Image (cartoon, grey):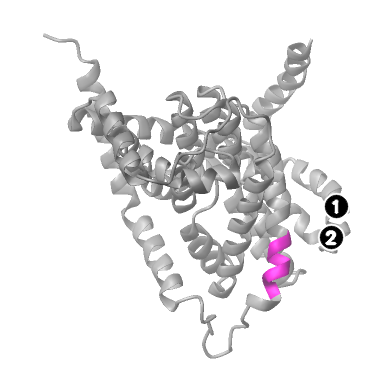
Amino acid sequence: MKEKWKTLMLSPIIICLCFALLRYPQHALEAAVRGLHMWWDVVFPSLLPFFIVSEILIGFGVVHFLGVLLEPLMRPLFKVPGIGGFVWAMGMASGYPVGAKLTARLRQQQQLSAIEAERLVSFTNSSNPLFIFGAISVGFFHNPNIGIILALSHYLGNICVGFMMRFHGKDDTAFVAKQKKGIFRQAFRAMHETRLKHGQAIGKLLGDAVRSSIQTLLMIGGFIILFSVLNKLLYITNITEWLAGIVRYALALFHLPSELSVPFIAGLFEITLGSQMTSETANATLLQKVIVTSFILAFGGFSVQAQVASILAEAHIRFQPFFIARIFHGLFAAFFASLLWKPLYVQPLESAEMLPVWLPETTSQWSIVYAHWIEQYGFFITATACFMYVMITFRREKPPA
């Protein structure tokens, strides 16, 4: 009966989407090109190195080495194995959806139980610092001073989600604490045994890492293009405005202006567009914009969540706990943004911007340089990687002579 209701609800939505594509082909094409440009020039070259390095580290057993070392930290705090520390660090450094990719990979290797995977994926997916400082604070708000507030509220909110999700579900097996004596020897033994277990040559391991990473990025690109078009069609058909009318009542409860409702709805679907529209809202204070942007960054947008859902489905990990965690992450991040505003924000001077003493001047400059570098050379990185993927796939699937 439940599946029949799903069919009954989804069928009209798909039909309406098809009619909207036929009715507004030019707008759909422009949105698709925008999504493709974002994926080809920015997302692909930014995430590809992290995906490849992660696969190689897992194959060589380095993840298991770190897992033994981090077990005394991750298990008491978040009720996940020590290898969760590696997933957390990589997810924070590289951004969405690396945490989900690594969690699914470790679950497929039986390194995580189902409940541990649901706990881990809930707090290891986040925006990376370069996106927060470079694209959001500098690119959209033209104010690097708010980058530290957005970043701290984002990552503190993620930690709170991790503490909250430690109470999710029951452990499949009782945890037996490891002795601290000889922990480095245990870690090295775990790494060595993992490398011998896989027993892959370096060339094959590297080829598999490139192939798996590009397959995942191709899937991510499809979702980015799809939701870019969907977001545009919702705006043209005034559905976004209709949804914004409902959101205005919720924003009023938090003393936020109704002008932020449309950017908020856009951010629920795609974080980049929502953050940009929020920064351009006229009748709202900077603090109000930062609060809404913090929620949007933490929620991740349905585009990112669809990517995560597809990745988790391959490892048979439930998506519902992740979705609930994203809502709480958004609330936590918005709360911390309002809490940290007065003690951390420094007003920019008219002649020159004054940065906080704890935020080095090189932080924002390096973010800008990196963003410009990706924008300039991202096309060539993506083209080269796709060519390598085609060559590797052709050689692997070519029948022997």
Mark 2–mark 1 contact, CB under 8 Å? yes
* Image quarter (top left, top right, bottom left or bottom right) of the N terminus: top right
* Image quarter (top left, top right, bottom left or bottom right) of the C terminus: top left
Image point 85% across, 64% down: which residue? 255
Image point 62% across, 27% down: which residue? 318
From the image, tell me which residue sits under label 1.
250
* Mark 2 Cα shell of 10 Å, populated few (<14), some (14-19), many (≥20): few
Element marked by disc 1: helix
- Which of the 4 image quarters holds residue 21? top right
Q: Amino acid at mark 2?
A: Phe
Q: Front-most of 328 and 268?
A: 328
Q: Main secondary structure of the magenta part?
A: helix
- The disc at residue 367 is none
Q: Front-most of 37 and 48?
A: 48
Residue 103 in the figure: left or right of residue 393? right
From the image, tell me which residue sits under label 2.
254
Residue 346 in the figure: left or right of residue 246? left
Image point 22% across, 26% down: which residue? 200
Q: Residue 273, position in %: x, y?
A: 60, 52
* Mark 1 Cα shell of 10 Å, populated few (<14), some (14-19), many (≥20): some
Q: Front-most of 182 and 194?
A: 182
Q: Amino acid at mark 1?
A: Ala
Q: Quick check: 176 above or below 93?
A: above
Q: Which residues are magenta?
A: 335-341
Q: Quick check: 242 above or below 343?
A: above
Q: Residue 307, position in %: x, y?
A: 54, 35
Element marked by disc 2: loop
Q: Residue 100, position in %: x, y?
A: 51, 37
The answer to whether residue 259 of the structure is visible from this angle is: yes
Q: CA distance from mark 2 to mark 1?
A: 7 Å
